Image (tube, grey):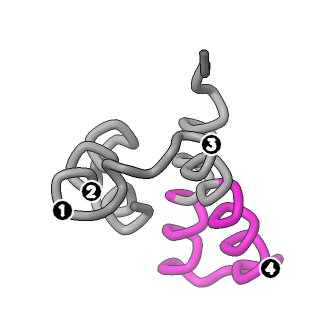
Amino acid sequence: MIWLIASGHTPEQAEHLAAERTALADAPSPSLDAFARAQNRMWDEIAGDAPDAWTATMQTAAATWHRHRSGRVTS
């Protein structure tokens, strides 16, 4: 997911594209929320205090997806 976002897709576009080709379509929303949170934490840890350009891009993409998922309203 974050590769798609890092490549310029919005989180909505990335989720739509991924759902067409992976098990994402069947994944429960809380599971995707948890995965986005884990990706965000992982890339924050990898990036540390002085990330290189590629790592910073991935960190930003992970944060973008996490914000998107954490802002969702579940019923």
How much space separates mark 4 and mark 2, taking CA atoms? Answer: 28 Å
The residue under the point 60% across, 66% down is 59
Residue 26 horizontal side relative to residue 41, left or right? left
Q: Earlier in the sequence, mark 3 or mark 2?
A: 2
Give the residue at x 63% y 66%.
Answer: 39
Q: Please, what is the three-letter code of the amino acid marked with disc 4?
A: Gly
Mark 3 vs mark 4: give the one in front.
3
Going from N to C along the chain, the mark reached first, 3 or 4, is: 3
**Image quadrant in which you'd find residue 70:** top right
Q: Which stretch is magenta?
A: 37-61
Q: Which residue is mark 4?
A: 48
Q: To which residue does mark 2 refer?
A: 18
Give the number of marks.
4
- The residue where tag 1 is placed is 21
Instruction: Tell me which numbered mark, 1 or 3, is placed earlier along the sequence.
Output: 1
Which amino acid is tagged 2?
Ala
Q: Nearer the viewer, residue 50 or 58?
A: 58
Secondary element type, mark 4: loop
Q: Is residue 74 magenta?
A: no
6 with respect to 9 (left or right) = right
Q: Is residue 71 left or right of residue 21?
A: right
Q: Nearer the viewer, residue 60 or 66?
A: 66
Q: Are the residues at dot 1 and dot 2 in contact (C-beta closer than 8 Å)?
A: yes
Disc nearer the start of the sequence (4/2): 2
Nearest to the observer: residue 18 or residue 12: 18
Q: Nearer the viewer, mark 3 or mark 2?
A: 3
Please tell me how crowded label 4 is: few (under 14), some (14-19), or many (20+) other residues with Cα within 10 Å.
few
Residue at (27, 56) in percent of width and height:
18
